[in-house]
């Protein structure tokens, strides 16, 4: 169980690094916006990243 979790953490870290420029752009957009647009963009960024990482196994099936 621990080995499987460790492999997923490594894969999630690699995926996050692959998305780094996209995430930088989304963080800049969040910091640039004000009010409810900033909140919606920030929340959408976090939710999308979580869903992306949770569905990692579906995309990397061999």
Image (tube, rainbow, N blue to C red):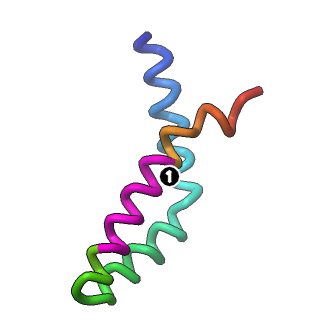
In the picture, measured across the screen, residue 42 lies left or right of residue 50, that is: left
Place residue 46 in its image quadrant: bottom left
By secondary structure, the bulk of the magenta-drawn segment is best described as helix
Identify the residue shown where x is 41% and y is 14%. 2
- Along the line of sight, the residue nearer the viewer: 16 or 55: 55
* Residue at the top extreme, as displayed: 1
Relative horizontal placement of residue 38, taking residue 22 as reference (left or right): left
Indicate whether 57 appears above or below 15: above
Disc 1, SS: helix
In front here: 55 or 36? 36
> Which residue is painted at 38% across and 81% down in the image?
28
Name which quarter of the figure residue 61 lies in. top right
Magenta range: 40-51
Q: Is residue 23 above or below residue 35?
A: above
Residue at 60% over, 32% down: 57
Count of number-bearing discs: 1
Q: Which residue is mark 1?
A: 16
Residue 21 image offset from top left, x and y in percent:
53, 70
Which residue is nearer to you in this view: 40 or 19? Answer: 40
On whether residue 60 falls in the magenta region, the answer is no
Image spot of residue 52 (x, y percent): 52, 48
What is the quadrant of the C terminus in the image?
top right
Split into 4 quadrants, where in the image is the N terminus? top left
**Residue at the image point whose x is 48% and y is 43% from the top:** 13
Residue sitting nearer the eye, 37 or 46: 37
**Residue 32: % across, % down:** 33, 89
């Amino acid at each position: 169980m621990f080995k499987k979790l460790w492999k997923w953490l490594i894969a999630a870290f690699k995926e996050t690094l692959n998305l780094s420029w996209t995430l930088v752009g989304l963080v800049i957009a969040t910091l640039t916006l004000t009010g409810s647009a900033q909140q919606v963009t920030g929340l959408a960024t976090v939710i999308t990243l979580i869903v992306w990482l949770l569905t990692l196994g579906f995309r990397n099936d061999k």
